[in-house]
Amino acid sequence: MKTIYQSTVTEVGSQVELFLQEKMIVLFNESAPSDLREIAVIHQYCPLEDDITVGDELVIGDQSFKITSVGHKVNETMRELGHSTVSFNGSLESDLPGTLCVEDKEVPNITVSSKIMFRKLSMGI
């Protein structure tokens, strides 16, 4: 298993709870525009060391989620802005280019200092 992204939450926007009720979160690194910060989980900048792909794992705090689909813009926006919308619905197709879908499990409790990681489960051939 290889960690390809590891960050720490620095701010949880005042409207994040509304998204959590819909089984979604919006990630942004600290470069997020002020008008989006209230809906976002803000985390420290860090580099994305490899592309996020189906079958990889998202870890938030002590909970892990298998990635079921990756919108075609997710890797680009994660590299540039630490940004993606994460949907905890288990969908095999992302409905929006910047959406990452993970298995349908209980949405994690996210607080300041929560860790966010993406991990490759297989190293390939």
Image: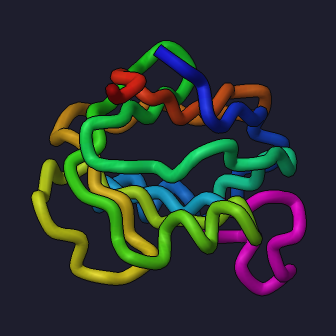
Q: Is residue 39 magenta?
A: yes
Residue span colored magenta: 28-40
Q: Nearer the viewer, residue 75 or 112?
A: 75
- For the C terminus, the quadrant is top left
**Residue 99 sits in quarter:** bottom left
Image coords of residue 37 (percent x, y): 76, 70
Question: What kind of secondary structure does the magenta stretch mostly adopt?
Answer: loop
Q: How is the image coloured?
A: rainbow
Residue at horizontal 56 percent and vertical 59 percent from the top: 16
Residue at horizontal 28 percent and vertical 55 percent from the top: 101
Q: Nearer the viewer, residue 98 or 87?
A: 98
Image coords of residue 43 (percent x, y): 77, 47
Residue at horizontal 70 percent and vertical 32 percent from the top: 6
Q: Is residue 14 visible?
A: no
Q: How many marks?
A: 0
Image coords of residue 72 (percent x, y): 38, 76
Image coords of residue 12 (percent x, y): 71, 50
Q: Nearer the viewer, residue 49 or 68?
A: 49
> With respect to residue 2, does 27 lie above or below?
below
> With respect to residue 50, does 111 lie above or below?
above
> With respect to residue 19, does 98 lie above or below?
below
Q: Is residue 117 visible?
A: yes
**Residue 112 sits in quarter:** top right
Residue at horizontal 40 percent and vertical 53 percent from the top: 20
Left or right of 52, for residue 7: right
Left or right of 34, for residue 116: left
